[in-house]
Amino acid sequence: MQKMIIMWFVVLAFFESCTHGNTIHLTDPIEAGREFIDASLKGNYAVAKKYVLADSVNMEYLSIATRNFDIKLSPQQKEGYKNANIIIDSIQKISDSVTIINFSNTYKKSPAKIKLIRKNNEWLVDFKFTFSGNSNYGSE
């Protein structure tokens, strides 16, 4: 009986993790970028953080984005972003280790860019690129 209970717990835990999209995709720049954008639109910055290149400037920008979403946006704006779809306008492969994604969303509809850098075989968002005037396309 105890084995049966443990088995059901394991099965439920497995399905719970599958249904909540806990898988982090860092092996493909497009998937990593799309998932970062999606998590950011939904205000899920704990997930978005998993896609960000961990340096002090990027973490500060992520902290600011989190505060802005939580404090400055109205409930209607938050809902608009959460329900928005991502529009990938173009993808630029700058090198084997740098990709730029030009995108917008169906709520705000203004163009934006993110830079993904491959580091230790993982594609991570260099979030500071979004705020730096988008002039530095090279790898760090």
Image (cartoon, rainbow, N blue to C red):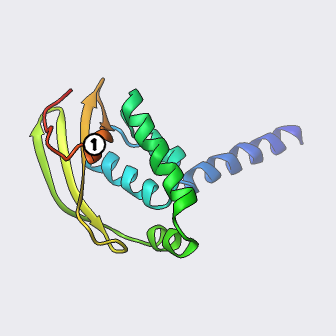
Query: Along the horizontal axis of the image, is 18 left or right of 104?
Result: right
Q: Quadrant of residue 19?
A: bottom right
| Image position of 121 (left or right of 95) | right
Residue 53 at x, y percent in the picture:
36, 33
Seen at 25% across and 31% down, the residue is: 118
Regarding residue 54, the answer to whether it shows in the image is no
Q: Is residue 68 above or below residue 13?
A: below
Query: Which class describes the residues within 10 Å of circle 1: few (<14), some (14-19), or many (20+)?
Result: some
Residue 52 percent location from the top left of the image: 39, 38
x and y, in percent, of residue 10 in the image: 71, 43
Q: Quadrant of the C terminus?
A: top left
Near-viewer residue (114 or 23)? 114
Q: Above or below — where is 105 with respect to 130? A: below
Q: Could you say which is closer to the camera, residue 7 or residue 41? A: 41
**Picture quadrant of residue 6:** top right
What residue is shown at x 60% (from left), y 49% (from top)? 17
